[in-house]
Image (cartoon, grey):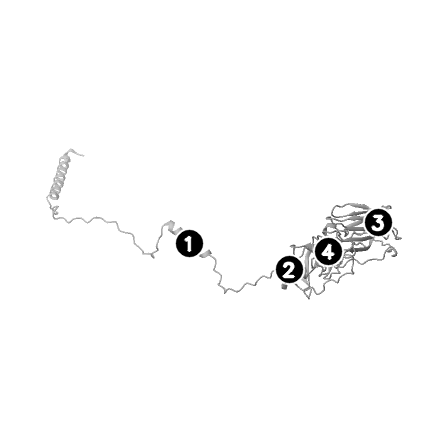
Amino acid sequence: MPLSTLPILRRHVVQTGILLFALLSLAGCGLFGSDSTAPTPLPTRTPFPTFTPTPLVATAPPAATAIATAAAEAVTLAPTPAPILEPTAAPTPVMAPQLTIASDAVNVRRAPSTAAELVGMVTAGQQFEVTGRTAAGDWWQICCVAGQQGWVFAELATVTNADAAPIVADAPVAAEALPTTDAAPVTQPEATAAPTAAVAEAPAAPPDPAASSAGWFDPNAQYQIVHFKVLGLEENNGGIRDSSAQHLIFLTVLDQNGNGVDGAVVRNLVGDKSEVVTGSKGPGKAEITMYYEPFKLTVVSDPSGPVTSQVSNQMGLVFPHLPDLVGKLGDVNYEYGACPTIDIKCSWPISAIHFSYEITFQKVK
């Protein structure tokens, strides 16, 4: 820059500074209005965001919401109550008839007849299910004795709910009378009887002798009972209560020709289970004195070796097979008698009277 222009520039700078100073002074003196007259500036506001209203929803605390949800689910899952039905009377259950033995000793038979084969014997107080009855109502079918159904004479038992027992229209017919019937065994011909023809079948195993007072009359046994009799009133040395009255079993064992067999061993299967050997009271004969113990006799051997044999009804003064005594120890008018009928004064134990038996075994094969 030439030196001749320098004073001019300086002058312009000074003028510019003076002008600025003057303008600032005017501003401080209120050229544009003092502080008291100047309008109060409005505060700057931040504008609110646009507000769109939404439907009002009640908001519950989280815990309350959970409880409400669980309650709603419970209501949803609760089973619909069943419709209430009018009460109806329940059918009355029919009780099965039951029989109670009312006599001390009662025979149970395969058919509703005193001539039928014996199933077993039952005693007072025993109870059984009733499975049937006769149309006349005089016999009851029961279950079970020795694993079998059987028949009991109605007068010897009591039955509850008797009307529920069905009538058995096809009740078995009684078998032919055997020594096990209610009457005393039929006396067979003595030694003159023709021997029975041999049978091919092997003898069946005898039943438990203690299961019943009845005997076992296997037709295939080598020794058969051919004579059986109860010696009672006026047949036993004068009377059953007389001190001289006998209480014996008169035993005889015969061969096929009717001759007495000495040395035959006869065993008692009940009571004292003793044995007696024939020949001490005559050919093929022996005597057994009875007191309290009962007797069911069978031949177990003879001089030829072991044998098979039928088994007698139970004998004895106290526990005899009761049907054998019926009518033998006085009628219903005799004060001191026993068993005028099967259901009058005819129960175990028999006491205070004496009677005896005759029994004969004969070898038939």
- Distance Cα–Cα, label 4 vs label 2: 20 Å
- Most distant residue in the left direction: 29
Q: Amino acid at mark 4?
A: Leu
Which residue corresponds to the image point at 80% horizontal and 46% vertical from the top-left?
276
Q: Secondary structure at mark 3?
A: strand
Q: Quadrant of residue 160?
A: bottom right
Q: Secondary structure at mark 1?
A: helix
For label 1, the residue is: 71
Task: Bin the neighbour count of mark 3 within 10 Å (Cα to Cα): few under 14, some 14-19, many 20 and up.
Answer: many
For the residues labelled 3 and 2, the Cα–Cα distance comes to 45 Å
Viewer-proximal residue among 110 and 299: 299
Does 352 appear above or below 2?
below
**Label 1 amino acid?**
Ala
Q: Nearer the viewer, mark 1 or mark 2?
A: 2
Q: Position of residue 210 (x, y in %)?
A: 73, 50
N-terminal of the two: label 4 or label 1?
Answer: 1
Q: Residue at x 45, y 57 (%)?
A: 76
N-terminal of the pair, mark 4 or mark 3, is 3
